[in-house]
């Protein structure tokens, strides 16, 4: 990312949110995507929590990679170092949320610790290292990807509440199968964005 | 829990992918071909067994506060180990699985089994739980992989199937993964409700 | 070789140290005074946040139980044995909690209840009730489009001949159907109650006769004849106080509309 | 739990210490494993590379890796990263041609390919090192010989077109447009990089 003019940032944002949406075309972060999208307010809460953690994680992992792993040439330990950072961050956010915003904490319930196993968070950190982004672009990339995740999970929660409210679904398809098929259609939609080339 | 129950639970009644719906990311992404699916399944099983055993050995020493952080580090350790060994000694599988080996770390099944089972049971049951849950994961992944390969690229294990007909390349794409898995889980739910003498 | 190992050992070790320390400090700083009974109860609950107990998630339900607002048997997934363990965690003072069950206060099926107009539209009670209070002449009765059926996690309600019926063995009395019904004809009563009132028509007797031939006309015969004084008629409809009712059955014989009956 | 205590001071030390031990031990174990596996991995990667290089330019004896060269070649809206340029030399040391390693972006992944350019600046061969593009689609590029043969012998960049190709154009494979366009971009980028490198050396 050479010159960070507004144009490149915009292109970067559209690319991360629409074209290579982390859930719908890169397949990362599906567990909470299906788990938390029953109600749209918990979905948004989850999206915000993931955005916050991804932003924080990208800063800390960038720091760890540049100042710890490279000088000691321990690049092969990047996975462990990153996942340690993410797990600690999630636990810190969980404790903070429990104290400061108990309502959101209770609503997210089991899915907050599941963010640690959210492939999207680790995936983003690993990709920004692979692509060799500098500090600002790796932060932007993480935040935009998280916004893409939030957008996808929010739209999906609207679809799911619509499915549950009005359509009657055959017994075998109730619950997750119908949501998976709805996700397939949503993923078709997002495939259309591949035509956008920046 | 006798071993037979664990076998039954791991593969059918409590299958991590079809019933518990865990580990969706690798399932949808690597099940484009049968070989990839089996490769992913077996490497995940290897990591699952080792991490279950080690975590159940250490369960008395890990305090509650850093429970998740400690389990994740152990799992990540085994994954990087598997990554190195695969790249050094089994290079062909490594090329096919590419980015998905590091993502086994965040494969929800492993942490879920570590958290809900290994940290509460002794070593032998944890070993079998890891083995059967891993096999259940590979079993579900293999079915999905076969279906997607036949429909998506018209081949099975690389051999061309129906001659000239252009395959539905949709199934090789991410969206096809969702679709395939959706119908697979519907079938699993249908079978399990029918087995319990389904209410309707 | 040893230097590499030492480098890795120290580098990641120190990182682990910093994070472990940070977590333990955060654990104390953000320490929320929590009733340890909540932790034990959460261990019993499945943690799937299905909402079957009528609360947003297992954590909310555990809070309610610890605060004493919620009975111990509300979790449909943990069922009886879960309820017992929770009751034991809550200590002896959790009084013997009577299992509750839902009851539809309406028996106006198609053959006995009259209709104002024929309704063509979404098969959804809420939508139907928006059109002049529903197609039934009786404003208070069940519309039979099954909003409660869709919401019930136990599949304990079914629509028979236009009226919702509760299957008492499956129902755990969680009360989700209560707010699903736009007409509010569902009530939660103890499972072992036998005498049931299946009507909630608050119009005076004359209008009720026109609406439905199984409607309560508010004649108060049941109220006068009940030896325990367990029945009172409020707003032209009889309401049974199940703490007093001894199921003697006198009211079922006396009721001119044969509305009060023994549960099947 | 053995390692937990009520008063915060000791608890702090115990938790921090436990995590320290676990992470340190795991890191140490991995360092050990890495010590043994790293050389093997490098070795096999080197072998595969040499094997491909010698396959492309058969009569070359040695391959010298160029130091400074244009890292990213862009033409039009396409940007293709260039990983390395190997200068092929025969026994006498005269320059026989180049091998340029490029990684154009395919549909869902990157195509890692090696393009050989002979003395006159014409493409003499292309080898795909790794392509994990969507299997059904990406593999077509590798197996479609007619498509790949069209790119042998070109001396200047060609345009990827969907319709009937005119001079200086190559038709993409139907059903695998994105991957075949990436392949063409790879070859173009290699030509461009070699030309830029030659100007550099000539100066």
Image (tube, coloured by chain):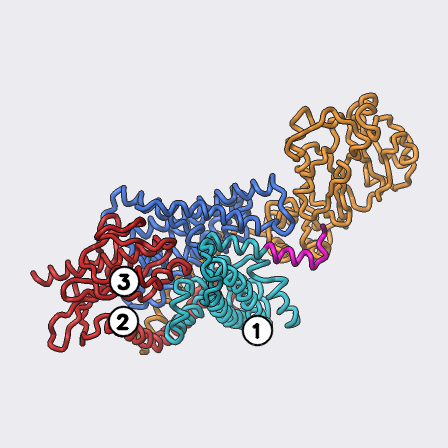
Same-subunit check for callouts 3 and 2? yes
Residue B179 in picture, x, y percent from top left: 52, 52
**Mark 1 secondary-structure assignment:** helix
Same-subunit check for callouts 2 and 1? no
Crowding at label 2, few (<14), some or many (≥20) Cα neighbours within 10 Å? some
Chain C visual colour: orange
Query: Are discs 3 and 2 less than 8 Å apart at CB?
Result: no
Chain A visual colour: blue
Region rendered in magenta: B186-200
Q: Image point 23% across, 73% down: which residue?
A: D54
Q: Is residue D80 above or below residue C60?
A: below
Residue D10 visible from this viewpoint? no
Q: Which residue is mark 1?
A: B123
Is B198 a magenta residue?
A: yes
Q: Image point 10% across, 63% down: which residue?
A: D201
Q: Image point 59% across, 62% down: which residue?
A: B15
Chain D visual colour: red
The reply, left or right, for residue C23 in relation to residue C193 is: left
Is D57 a magenta residue?
A: no
Given residues D114 and C101, the one toward you in this image is D114
- Give the chain of mark 2: D
Query: Are discs 2 and 1 less than 8 Å apart at CB?
Result: no
Given this view, does label 2 or label 1 mark the residue nearer the observer? Answer: 2
Task: In the rendered structure, find residue C246 and report the number of the disc placed on it.
Answer: none
Q: Which residue is mark 2?
A: D52
Q: CA distance from mark 3 to mark 2?
A: 18 Å
Query: Are discs 3 and 1 less than 8 Å apart at CB?
Result: no
**Mark 2 secondary-structure assignment:** helix
Residue C180 visible from this viewpoint? yes
Q: Which residue is mark 3?
A: D149
Residue C162 in picture, x, y percent from top left: 75, 36
């Amino acid at each position: 990312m050479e010159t960070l003019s507004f144009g490149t940032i915009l292109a970067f944002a559209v690319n991360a949110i629409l074209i290579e949406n982390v859930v719908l075309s890169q397949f990362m972060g599906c567990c909470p995507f299906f788990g938390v999208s029953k109600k749209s307010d918990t979905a948004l809460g989850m999206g915000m929590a993931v955005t916050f953690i991804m932003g924080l994680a990208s800063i800390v992992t960038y720091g760890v990679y540049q100042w710890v792993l490279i000088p000691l040439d321990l690049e092969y330990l990047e996975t462990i170092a990153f996942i340690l950072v993410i797990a600690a961050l999630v636990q810190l956010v969980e404790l903070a949320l429990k104290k400061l915003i108990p309502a959101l904490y209770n609503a997210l319930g089991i899915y907050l610790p599941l963010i640690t196993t959210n492939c999207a968070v680790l995936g983003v950190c690993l990709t920004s290292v692979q692509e060799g982004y500098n500090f600002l672009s790796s932060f932007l990339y993480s935040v935009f990807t998280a916004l893409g995740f939030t957008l996808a999970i929010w739209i999906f929660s609207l679809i799911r509440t619509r499915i549950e409210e009005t359509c009657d679904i055959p017994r075998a398809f109730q619950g997750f199968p119908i949501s998976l098929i709805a996700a397939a259609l949503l993923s078709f939609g997002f495939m259309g964005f591949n035509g956008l080339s920046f | 829990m006798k071993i037979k129950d664990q076998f039954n639970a791991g593969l059918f009644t409590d299958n991590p992918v079809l019933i518990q719906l865990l580990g969706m990311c690798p399932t949808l992404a690597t099940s484009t071909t049968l070989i990839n699916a089996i490769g992913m399944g077996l490497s995940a099983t290897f990591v699952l067994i080792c991490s279950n055993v080690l975590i159940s050995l250490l369960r008395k020493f890990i305090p509650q506060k850093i429970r998740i952080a400690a389990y994740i580090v152990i799992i990540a350790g085994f994954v990087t180990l598997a990554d190195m060994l695969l790249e050094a000694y089994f290079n062909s599988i490594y090329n096919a699985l590419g980015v998905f080996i590091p993502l086994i770390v965040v494969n929800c099944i492993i942490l879920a089994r570590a958290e809900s089972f290994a940290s509460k049971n002794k070593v032998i049951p944890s070993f079998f739980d890891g083995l059967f849950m891993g096999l259940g994961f590979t079993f579900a992944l293999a079915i999905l992989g076969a279906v997607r390969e036949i429909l998506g690229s018209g081949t099975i294990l690389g051999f061309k199937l129906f001659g000239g007909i252009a395959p539905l390349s949709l199934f090789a794409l991410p969206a096809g993964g969702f679709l395939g898995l959706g119908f697979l889980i519907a079938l699993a739910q249908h079978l399990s409700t029918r087995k319990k003498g389904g209410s309707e | 070789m040893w230097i590499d190992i030492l480098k890795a050992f120290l580098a990641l070790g120190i990182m682990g140290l910093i994070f472990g320390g940070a977590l333990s400090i955060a654990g104390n700083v953000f320490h929320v005074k929590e009733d340890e009974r909540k932790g034990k109860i959460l261990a019993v609950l499945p943690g799937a946040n299905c909402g079957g107990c009528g609360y947003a998630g297992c954590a909310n339900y555990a809070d309610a139980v610890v605060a004493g607002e919620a009975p111990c048997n509300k979790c449909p997934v943990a069922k009886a044995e879960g309820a017992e363990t929770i009751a034991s965690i809550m200590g002896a003072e959790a009084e013997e909690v009577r299992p509750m069950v839902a009851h539809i206060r309406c028996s106006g099926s198609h053959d006995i209840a009259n209709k104002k107009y024929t309704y063509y539209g979404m098969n959804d009670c809420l939508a139907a009730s928006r059109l002049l209070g529903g197609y039934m002449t009786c404003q208070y009765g069940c519309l039979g489009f099954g909003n409660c059926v869709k919401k019930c996690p136990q599949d304990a309600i079914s629509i028979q001949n236009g009226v919702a019926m509760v299957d008492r063995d499956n129902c755990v009395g969680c009360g989700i159907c209560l707010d699903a019904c736009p007409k509010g004809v569902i009530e939660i009563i103890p499972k072992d109650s036998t005498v049931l009132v299946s009507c909630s028509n608050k119009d005076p007797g004359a209008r009720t006769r026109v609406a439905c031939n199984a409607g309560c006309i508010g004649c108060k015969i049941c109220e006068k004849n009940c030896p325990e004084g367990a029945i009172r008629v409020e707003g032209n409809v009889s309401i049974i106080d199940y703490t007093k009712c001894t199921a003697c059955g006198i009211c079922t014989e006396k009721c001119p509309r044969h509305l009060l009956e023994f549960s099947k | 739990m053995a390692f937990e205590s009520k008063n915060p001071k000791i608890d702090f030390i115990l938790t921090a210490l436990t995590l320290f031990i676990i992470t340190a031990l795991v890191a140490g174990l991995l360092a050990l494993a890495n010590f043994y596996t790293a050389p093997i991995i490098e070795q096999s990667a080197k072998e595969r590379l040499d094997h491909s290089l010698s396959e492309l330019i058969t009569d070359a004896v040695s391959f010298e890796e160029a130091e400074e060269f244009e890292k990213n070649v862009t033409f039009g809206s396409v940007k293709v990263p260039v990983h390395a340029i190997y200068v092929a030399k025969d026994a006498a040391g005269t320059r026989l041609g180049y091998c340029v390693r490029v990684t154009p972006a395919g549909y869902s992944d990157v195509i890692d390919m090696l393009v050989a350019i002979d003395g006159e600046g014409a493409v003499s061969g292309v080898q795909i090192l790794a392509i994990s593009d969507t299997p059904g689609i990406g593999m077509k590029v590798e197996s479609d010989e007619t498509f790949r043969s069209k790119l042998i012998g070109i001396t200047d960049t060609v345009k990827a077109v969907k319709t009937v190709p005119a001079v200086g154009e190559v038709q993409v494979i139907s059903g695998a447009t994105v991957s075949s366009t990436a392949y063409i971009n790879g070859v173009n980028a290699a030509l461009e990089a070699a030309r830029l490198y030659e100007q550099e050396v000539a100066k």
